Image: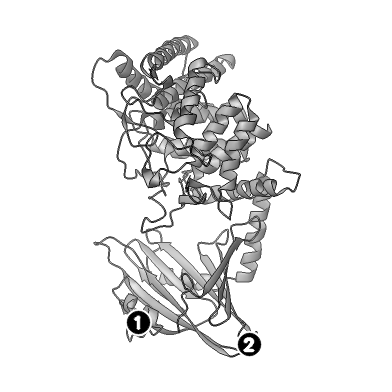
Amino acid sequence: MLIKLHDDINNQYNQYYTENTNILNTQIKNTYFNLKILQTDFVPIDKNVLVKTYTFTNENQIDLDINFLLHSKLLSNDNNFIGAKVIQNGIMQYSHDYTFTILSKSHKITTHQINNTKHNIYTGEINDKDYIGMSHDSSINYEIGKLKPNETKTIEIMIHINQNNTKHKLDEIEEQLNNISQIDIKKELQQTQKYWERYVKEHTKIELKEETQYNKKVKKIYTRTILLYPLLTNEQTGGIGAAIEIDENLQKCGRYAYCWPRDAVFITKALDMLGMQEQTEKFYKQFCQNTQSKNGMWEQRFYTDTRLAPCWGYQIDETASVIYGIYEHYKFTKNIKFLKENLKMMEKAIKYLQKYITLVIEKKEEIQKSYDLWEMHEGIHLYSLASIFSAYECMIKTYQIFEQEQDTSAKLKQQAIQKQKEILQKQQLKIKEYIIQNMYDETKKSYTRGVEDKTIDISILGAVTPFEIFTPKEKRITNTIEKIDLTLRTYTGGYQRFEQDHYMNGNPWPIATLWMGLYHLEQNNKEKAKECLDFVINSASQHGFLAEQIDNNTMQPAWVIGLGWSHAMFIILLNQMFN
């Protein structure tokens, strides 16, 4: 009989991380056979290999004869066919661009099947005479052997992905695989555990002294955030992905393995608070400088290697957010050298924003409509204009810093600096006047999402925090908060993004709820801020991950789990509550 480790009616599961690490353990107990399996997954710190160990323990009173089958189906486009080749102790699947290899350090293959194993893999019987074939659907079988009652045996599986643009010759790949097969897995596991434990210790900046149940939940999310961000960051380019992509069939995630500059800016604020300033600087100095368009803007999203990703629209706040993020990092570090290194990029972006604002305010010609923060509605939006207002403020303050330093090395004369500051300040006033005149609905007694779009949207809060056009206690703002509470707050205590939000059932979002918490902190209302924080803490996953949404019916994480932006808002709110 066949036990499906990932999905079997007789399986009981318990999953946990080794404390303070990215080492994942999955306990599987098959109640039919009384067979216990411990699966441990980890990636050694300095090796391009995923290690998966499976330890089988026979808790039955009879012998169990065990074979271990692995089924692998590679996805590829129609013009990039997959081949498969049986090698010593494993199988190599390859296309023009990649080679994907599964091999065991401790066991030899007993049987294999290259072609179409999806038709018979669940029979547990695979067999093929060919050692090589053209198929993306293959399987291999390892013999574990007989387990006597209470006996334990382990198989070690290693998965290696080779990018063929560096090494593509068969002998080169085989040499790599031979080196991998020599890995001391026990030693690598110990080193990996020590690395992550040290990493968490170095980046824990908030100490929760009382060991209350609540503080344990907070610490779990905080620690998981520290461990998540290195997994989202491209070490070579500084690009920061929105989330780890794990769902090829789009059942739990909607393609998030891209870098949205705006999302990444929020994440860099959290990185600074976690003592990860080097990652922040690499994002701006490398990723942003390499992805900025000639006209000064940033497109909607990119692959983390800086290549342009598929986009579906124009978003002006992506560009404004980068300028804001650069200055926020300077505020945190007081690193003038960092400002100098990014000045030219900031000025290009400002010129682009100035052209946009001139078209919006003076209405000389039709403007290119921008998508809103949630990338669903086109128009002129309050959040977008607030982000530009803030970008101007950051540019003005940057110039003031250079004036104080009497620094002209960036080819800026003091007179030119003063003139540019005056232009930006005048446009700032016009932006604020435009918002007041066009985006406050007297009937609703609230600011609304856009000029023509009168929807109540949580992103309106951006005008208070983080972009500071308005103060939190202004009458129009407090009116708006009352309206948001009436329309966006769900019966569970979380906040939706906007009225009639039907995306994935229209659930509350941690981002929206934490944003409201930040507003309440601006009001110096820590009690209400904590209510928002508590909602998010109590709906985190068992491992401490924050999702994009919270299922309003079950209070469980929904859609993509481990969203970098959600974790960033958590860190920002938590940090402000403690400091």
- Above or below — where is 417 with respect to 264? above
Q: Residues within 10 Å of mark 1 (few under 14, many from 20)?
A: few
Q: Quadrant of the N terminus?
A: bottom left
Q: Secondary structure at mark 2?
A: loop
Q: Earlier in the sequence, mark 1 or mark 2?
A: 1
Q: Which mark is residue 276?
A: none
Q: Secondary structure at mark 1?
A: loop
Q: Nearer the viewer, mark 1 or mark 2?
A: 2
- State which quadrant residue 40 falls in: bottom right
Can residue 410 be seen here? no
Q: Which mark is residue 149?
A: 2
- Above or below — where is 411 with respect to 528? above
- State which quadrant residue 433 falls in: top left
- Above or below — where is 567 with respect to 25? above
Relative to 52, 368 lies left or right: left
Residue 221: x, y in percent? 60, 48
Relative to 492, 99 lies left or right: left
Tell whether label 2 touches label 1 (CB within 8 Å): no
Residue placed most toward the observer, 577 or 277 = 577
Q: Residue at x 74, y 48 (%)?
A: 211
Q: Amino acid at mark 2?
A: Pro
Of all residues shown, which one is farthest toward the right?
A: 210
Residue 339: x, y in percent? 53, 27
Q: Which residue is mark 1?
A: 131
